[in-house]
Amino acid sequence: MKICRYDDDRIGLVQDDYVTDITALYRSIISNEETLGDKLIIHLADLRTRIQNASNLEKRPVSDVALKSPLKTPTKIIAAPVNFGRHIEEMQQQGLADGFEMDIRKAGLFLKATSALVGPSEGVALRFPDRRNDHEVELVAVIGKTGTNIPTQDALNYVAAYTLGLDMTVRGKEDRSFRKSIDSFAVLGPWLVTSDEISDTTNLDFSLSVNGEPRQQANTSDMVLGVAELIAFASTFYTLHPGDVIYTGSPAGVGPVHAGDTMYASAPSIGSMTVNVRNHSL
Ligand code: MN
């Protein structure tokens, strides 16, 4: 099942090239109680049941809707640094590694602000166009249920869905959480693919091009810590809640973007998204 958020806070079921509006179904099941996490994920199983029993819902071509971040209120965005060997090598070659630990088991994970979340239709806005602003395309796992100290062998049972992320980055010496939390620097999309549709997280192709030029082409088999290991690792520090997001790390090929550029991120098992870059205007 593919679920998107679009236009003015609408929820959609994506099938082939169409979006079916399931906003009314969604709103009929979400509760007003204050629980930690993203309501779409908290109520995903219930939503799936309602969808199976629904009929006569409105459909529109996916190209006609404005795709937003599929998640709205995750309690945290967790991200993995230095999780692909060839990305570590390019960081060292380009002088981006100085002062940073290159072993993820020692470096740990980092957090991005949830206020940085955007969907593909909103694009990325550069606040420091004179500095180097890089794309990092990453597979993103979305946590489905609350857990802490999760064993690796049980970790994938905690995943509700997968999606693609752009961990946008202004390069520099500041703390990662500072440089990577600029508004719009956490792109998610094009939609959620529920975990039952992804049979093997250790062999997923994904890629990114800028203005049609290939930049990043990768497979999750090259990750230092796989999805399950990252979830287990994160949960030794944090309780994970439904809707929490884990950016699983950038492969090699990171490079700068500028206002006017168009990024295209794609994964055959998930989908693709086009994201425009502009300068931030005050
Ligand atoms: Mn990253």
Image (cartoon, rainbow, N blue to C red):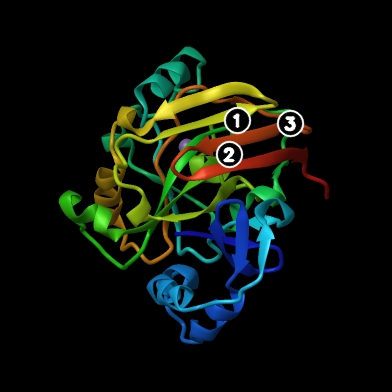
Q: Earlier in the sequence, mark 2 or mark 1?
A: 1
Q: Please report contact status of discs 2 and 1: CB closer than 8 Å, yes or no.
A: yes
**Which residue is at a point 48% across and 25% down the rendered structure image?**
217
**Which residue is at a point 36% across and 64% down the rendered structure image?**
144
> The residue tagged with tag 3: helix, strand or loop?
loop
- Position of the N terminus, as image quadrant, is bottom left
Closer to us: 119 or 278: 119
Mark on residue 261? 3
Q: Please report contact status of discs 3 and 2: CB closer than 8 Å, yes or no.
A: no
Residue most extreme to the front: 56
> The residue tagged with tag 1: helix, strand or loop?
strand
Lateral position of residue 136 relative to residue 104, left or right: right
Residue 269 position in % (x across, y down): 44, 42
Mark on residue 134? 1
For residue 19, what is the image quadrant?
A: bottom right
Residue 249 position in % (x across, y down): 42, 37
Q: Nearer the viewer, mark 1 or mark 3?
A: 3
Residue 103 visible to the viewer = no
